[in-house]
Amino acid sequence: MPIVTTLMYRSKMPVLWVALLVLTLGTSAIFERQRLIGELTLQSAVLHRLASQQADQHDAHLTALSAIFVKGGAERQDLFLEVAAAITRFYPRIISAHVVPYDPAERGIDSTPGLSEDDTALIRRLAKSSTGQVQIAPAIARTGHYWVIKRTPNTDDATHALALLINASDLIASDNVFWQTPSVSRRLATPEGQHLTGQPAATGTVLTKTLGSRSQPLVLETGLSISRNDILPLGRVAWVVGLVSALFATGALILKQRSRRKEAERSATLSAQETRLAHASRVNAMGEMASGMAHELAQPLTAILSQAQAGRHLARRGDVARLAGVLDDTVSQAQRAADILDRLRRWSKPNRSELTACSLDEAVQNVERLLAREMEMRGAQVTLQLADTPLTIFADPVELEQVIFNLMRNALEASEAAQITVTTREQDDHAIAEVADNGPGVPETLRPRIFEPFVTGKPGGTGLGLALCQRLVEEMDGDIALLPDAAQTTFRISLPLVKEGEHK
């Protein structure tokens, strides 16, 4: 046995064992901590989405109750109370519904008696100060509850206030066992920071996000206080110590017994490393494809969700005429998702999709209609400056819209109340499309690599959107670039125009 190996066995064995044990425990703790944080992020996103959807339902209930009260008036309290009873029965988080007259001398309507004078005054004051928007405020006499208030009718001539009492705890309730863990916390507060329900996280990881409801932008805070027992429970420590000790003893014995075959073992180790690298390469390729699929499908699925919510609202109102259009849009977006899946399935294949002559301006207008609802919710504005003459190019219509959608969606997410300008024109036998926004711009460090996969400046971004845009544009014999000297952040697409009599 070589002298170095002998010395290792005689003097360094305990040190190596301790180092390996510490490394294994440390790695296990890091992975467990990341797993817990990942679970918190995932479950928080699910809870946020559900709470946002439920908050949006309150607007619909207020609208329905307001219409019933305006039609029947105080004389037909039975109509109002009947609908209010149905709402509170099917939506237990809605505790009660009330109509409070501006004139204290008049009698109001209460689905549940016992409205306090303080809350009555609060409802009346907020409704009078409203300019048409829904008002929210913590209930004075009911801890953990808040009011959703609007004037009725919703005009400057309003004479009554309409209010729903909401149980804040039920709004963020969940049956998932994750939220029953002692180290996990959740809390709901008003936009001004007034506590409604739950407990704030004392230490650890805290995630804060405003609900996606324009009328009720309540703040959802979730937290995870990670202790040593969470990432390194005693049972796991004992198991790791035993496993490392057994493996280390076995490895030491094998090394001692096979010292004369060191070269052969080196060859075997190199071979095993090559196998692991090949496997890692395949896993990374699969991960890229999966990330790309999730990134692209999120867009039509978001549109389908929005249309479904709008359809449910129209169905509840009995607006069958408009419901048909919403269902048509939903079918269109489902087909779009199917087309995207087909494109992603063929992404890795050498053959290209068949290109057809299509209109660049029509693709821009389709995407603008697709994003209209989200832009309205975000307070964003898009300006289309389209060419005077038709711009016809050879492209796959779905892929062309996908490129424009990605660029406009990035511009929409770049800043609050984004101002986006989409310009098309003809230049040197090419169709030019430019998407500009007033956001903070792309950091100088990212500009040279902005089209590389997994390079992104957005928190939580996949870094695949622009890479996919570049791939699709190049398959259309065009190019895409981030303009370096533009006053605003501007991406330019250049595609060859269809020449007269040209076919592909």
Image: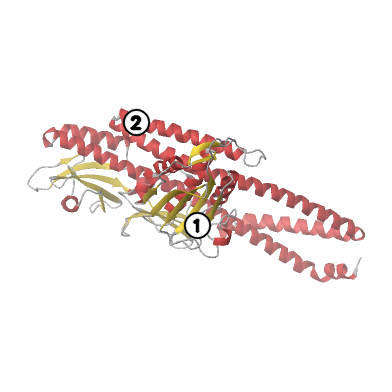
Describe residue 297's horizontal placement relative to residue 96 as left or right. right
Which picture quadrant has residue 202? bottom left
Q: Residues within 10 Å of mark 1 (few under 14, many from 20)?
A: few
Describe residue 249's horizontal placement relative to residue 416 as left or right. right
Q: Secondary structure at mark 2?
A: helix
Three-letter amino acid code at disc 1?
Pro
Who is closer to the viewer here, 501 or 401? Answer: 501
Q: Which mark is residue 150?
A: none
Q: Given the current orientation, which residue lies at the most extreme front position?
A: 500
Q: Which mark is residue 323?
A: 2
Q: Dividing the image into 4 quarters, which one contains the C terminus?
A: top right
- The residue under the point 76% across, 66% down is 16
How far is mark 1 from mark 2, CA to CA?
36 Å
Q: How is the image coloured?
A: secondary structure
Residue that carries the numbered disc 1 in the rendered image: 459
Three-letter amino acid code at disc 2?
Leu
Q: How many marks?
A: 2
- Asked whether residue 62 is in view, the answer is yes
Who is closer to the viewer here, 44 or 412? Answer: 412
- Asked whether residue 291 is in view, the answer is no
Q: Residues within 10 Å of mark 2 (few under 14, many from 20)?
A: many
Residue 247, compared with residue 159, is above or below; it is below
x and y, in percent, of residue 256 in the image: 87, 61
Which picture quadrant has residue 244? bottom right
